């Protein structure tokens, strides 16, 4: 089995979901996942445990994390709100609960003196969460067995 990050797997499921259409007269190519069922699944799914340490990378560069943080909550999707603990690039450490990052809204939240300040940065949307020591590469590198193409189990066997 090839290990994938939890977010990669969820993104793959979303990409391959759609509406199922039944027609007894002819064959219609169907998506792998029913989008309504997948949405229900994602509503209850928490890919990371609360307080779990996560590593944030720049999209396409998975060798050195930009930030280390911990999962705080799931405000609006399967992408968590993250309390930043360390900026790996600058070596700066943050007190837990003082700086929050929300990837989906490209927002950084700073807590100071009991008040929360929100700042928007477009680069935040390009951050990705990868499980530490799990990166099988791009899912598109692998063949699709459902539609008749041969599946390559691991890149090194190519």
Image (cartoon, rainbow, N blue to C red):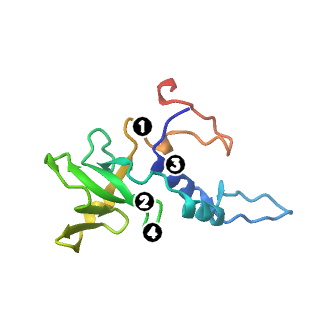
**Which one is earlier in the sequence, the residue at label 2 or at label 3?**
3
Task: Compute the Cα span from label 1 to label 3.
Answer: 12 Å
Element type at mark 1: loop
Task: Compute the Cα span from label 2 to label 4.
Answer: 8 Å
Label 3: how many residues lie within 10 Å, few (<14), some (14-19) or many (20+)? Answer: some
- Give the farthest residue toward the top: 157
Is residue 73 shown to the viewer in this render?
yes
Q: Position of residue 132 (x, y in %)?
A: 37, 39
Of residue 98 and residue 118, the one placed in the foreground of this image is 98
Q: Position of residue 18 (x, y in %)?
A: 63, 63
Check whether the beta carbons of the residues at disc 1 and disc 3 lie within 8 A of each other.
Answer: no
Q: Which mark is residue 79?
A: 2
Check whether the beta carbons of the residues at disc 2 and disc 3 lie within 8 A of each other.
Answer: no
Check whether the beta carbons of the residues at disc 3 and disc 4 lie within 8 A of each other.
Answer: no
Q: For this view, does 151 lie left or right of residue 62?
A: right
Of residue 47 and residue 25, the one placed in the foreground of this image is 47
Q: Which residue is mark 3?
A: 9
Is residue 121 shown to the viewer in this render?
no
Q: Which residue is mark 4?
A: 76
Task: Compute the Cα span from label 4 to label 1.
Answer: 25 Å
As displayed, is residue 152 above or below residue 41?
above
**Which one is earlier in the sequence, the residue at label 3 or at label 4?**
3
Label 4: how many residues lie within 10 Å, few (<14), some (14-19) or many (20+)? Answer: few
Task: Compute the Cα span from label 2 to label 3.
Answer: 13 Å
As displayed, is residue 74 above or below residue 93?
below
Q: Position of residue 103 (x, y in %)?
A: 34, 62
**Which one is earlier in the sequence, the residue at label 2 or at label 1?**
2
Task: Compute the Cα span from label 3 to label 4.
Answer: 19 Å
Q: Which residue is mark 1?
A: 134
């Amino acid at each position: 089995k090839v290990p994938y990050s939890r977010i990669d797997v969820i993104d793959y499921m979303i990409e391959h979901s759609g509406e199922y259409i039944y027609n007894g007269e002819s064959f219609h190519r169907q998506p792998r996942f029913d989008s309504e069922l997948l949405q229900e699944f994602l509503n209850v799914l928490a890919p990371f445990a609360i307080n779990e340490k996560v590593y944030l990378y720049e999209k396409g560069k998975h060798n050195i994390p930009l930030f280390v943080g911990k999962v705080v909550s799931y405000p609006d999707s399967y992408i968590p709100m993250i309390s930043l603990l360390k900026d790996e690039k600058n070596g700066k450490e943050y007190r837990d609960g003082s700086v929050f990052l929300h990837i989906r809204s490209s927002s950084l939240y700073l807590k100071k003196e009991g008040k929360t300040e929100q700042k928007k940065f477009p680069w935040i949307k390009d951050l990705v969460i990868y499980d530490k020591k799990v990166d099988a590469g791009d899912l598109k590198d692998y063949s699709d067995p459902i539609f008749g193409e041969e599946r390559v189990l691991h890149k090194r066997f190519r």
